[in-house]
Image: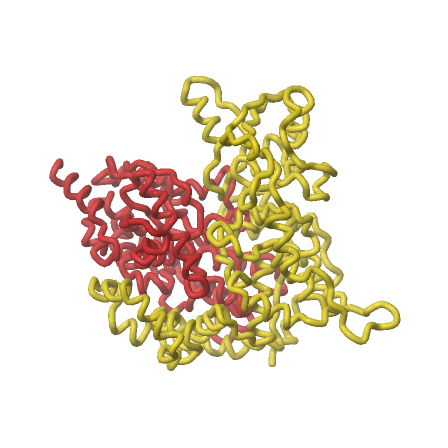
Chain colours: A red, B yellow
Amino acid sequence: MKVAYWPGCVSRGFTPELHGSMAKVAPLLDIELVELDRAACCGAGVIAEHNQELADTLNARTFALAQQTDGELMMNICSTCQGAQSECQERLDANTDYREHVNTHLSEEGLKYEKGLTNKNFLWLLVEDFGLDELRSRVKRPLTDLRVGPFYGCYIVRPVDRLGIDDEHPRDRYLHQLIEALGGTVVDYAGVYKCCGFPIITMNKEASLTQAGRHVGDAIDAEADCLVVPCPLCHLNLDLQQPVAAKVVGRELGLPILHLPQLVGLALGLSPKELGMNKHIVRPTSVIDWSTSVVAAA
Amino acid sequence: MPEYTLRIRRYDPQSGEAAYWEDHTVEMGAKQSVLDAILKIKDDTDGSIGIRCSCQQAICGSCGVRMNGKPGLACNTHLDEAAERGHGTGWNPGLAAGAEAEELGGEREDVIAVEPMGNMPVIRDLIVDMDAVHWKKIQRVTPWLINKEPVPEREYIVPHENMVDVTQTMACIQCGACVSDCLSMEVDPGFIGPAALSKAYRFVGDPRDAEPKERLKDLSEDEHGIYDCTHCFNCIDACPKGVDPMSQIMRLRRRAGDEYHINDRNNGNRHERAFVTLVRDYGLLHEAELLPRSYGGDSWFGKFHPAAAGELLSSMPSAIPAVMRGKISPKLAALGHKIPKQDLKSVQEIYKQVDDPEHEVELNLYVTGYEDETPEHSPHDDEPDDHPGETVGAEEREAPAESSVPEPEEDER
């Protein structure tokens, strides 16, 4: 399938391994990525906190660009983009007057956002459009014996109404389902749906890193080999900042944190290095050991 | 009649014994409330269960508890809903127990785990100490109107749109459900929190109040104030009244920054301004500039500010390996990444048209509601089935007399 692909800023900035691993994984799943390289930052909730209309307009522009492509839908690889964009889209779709008003700012470029865009995180697309059965059939290296803790990130699980989470679309269980479909073992721990703390890293570093450190610690106590996150901002706090978080919570940590496409890529047979895991701050030793042991066994 | 098992968390701090779960089974209609069930158990089996309640109509806000991992009012949560609930929350002891029974070969049970709310000390069983946490925080925000002088002889005349603006916060019944699951408070008990900050907006947004600026300065400068919210949306899903506390906190930030230019010592406003400026100048976020500017000030020189230097030094343990391992390229760190020139120009044109505090438009869906009867705005727009839950609350509310959205022509300047 062909999708209008919004990688977000951080996946092309401080977590280049995310954008890179998505590019490696997409062809293995026959997903054609039409990159929205003309679109601007989603605002991550911060621009909306400054001026709601500005955030709505920037994202309406992104949606309009996506609608110009021949992609079936728009796909992102960042929980924060998903949440911030869903919030703007909710306002744009709820009120014709407002949408037309916002569209006046796009008219100079000849762009117009038409209500009703489908914008899905890679996780949602995998489960709802690609299908877990299809994914299972493509697994080359099942994640047998790999104990994976899901970490969703706030923006992709709340508010449940806005994100369309209900019994028919249990999107807050998709990471669990995905880990199982790839052959891994789901590790449940206290932090699954909690906040990584990243939004307040510049305002209250201690509170921010206490959150990150606590969740990583809880996952270690639950004997996880790694965590998987669909959000690069969570990855920054959980991986890049993990050594500092360890000091804040006063215990040793050292748990590898994987981006979602990296976990999928591992199961599809790519090597940790191809997936950019050598770029992580916490060396994904346990994951590499696991992958070599699987190769050796095979 | 369906059967429900209520797994109630029992705890008496004075007894010296640890908390424990106690199962009670009731036969009751699916649309009776969790509170009905607890009161029946108290009447029929065990009168010693502690729970606070009064009106039983979702008005007094006394019976806040956690049901299957999610906070809410016991009196307006149906038994069938409580047995199923748990989307977007973490550990769900009830569902786990129900599934366990199924795995053991029995029938799947409808188990509803009822616990006291979080973030507050337990007095007994389901009763928490609201005074020690919730009410103390409410008092912290000066929860009354400070009259503007001179006080008019008769009533104040207040514009309709201003009062509509604060109605959402006035819907709060002080039940504490948002406080219970606040993830910032979980790690920083000093955080003023969602309920009290919503209350603060009720007065900041009221044109009769004499000191909105002082209120905002106080709440920005406090290290546990508006910039301590981690934006996790838990309070939004917790609130049984649609107060949307996190959005009220964001509106406080918007006013503090845009209207009063309060440059707080917590880097809150600097971070916001740096973010907005960087997206204007690059089209994308320039992470390497965001950090120093958040500490040192919103310009390229921000990183040379003494406040930024210390922070930058302290982030070296993460930054150096990140550069060494090719995670952060030195070129990207120095120059950032930009969208194509023509597109950047368009983005900057949008900024010119929209980023003007004088003519800002804010759409509050609580006030305006959704214009469609059928939830076409639904995220599942590729599917014809309707999800009545999507707009619950909004569609029940009356539409205001006037729209807060301007006619498109008005804004073409």
**Coordinates of residue B142 in the picture (x, y in percent):** 67, 62
* Picture residue at 62% right of the left edge, 47% below the top: B176
User: Eyeballing the image, is B201 above or below B55?
Assistant: below
Is residue B154 found left or right of B273 in the rendered image?
right
> Quarter of the image holding residue B192?
bottom right
Q: Quadrant of residue B151?
A: bottom right
Q: In percent of the image, x 56 and y 24: which residue is there?
A: B5
Furthest residue to the left?
A296
Return the x and y of residue B188 as percentages of the image width and height: 48, 54
Q: Residue furthest top?
A: B106
Could you tell me which quadrant the N terminus of chain B lies in? top right
Seen in the image, is A31 located left or right of residue B381?
Answer: left
In the image, taking residue A114 as reference, residue A28 lies left or right, namely left
Give the image location of residue A236, x and y in percent. 34, 58
What residue appears at the point 25 percent right and 72 percent down from the top-left corner?
A: B330
- Image position, residue B365 (x, y; %): 63, 57
Q: Is residue B343 visible?
A: no
From this viewpoint, is residue B411 visible?
Answer: yes
Q: Residue at x 38, y 58 (%)?
A: A233
Numbered circles on residues, count: 0
Name the quarter where the C terminus of chain B is drawn: bottom right
**Foreground residue, B294 or A61?**
B294
Residues B407 and B243: in front is B243
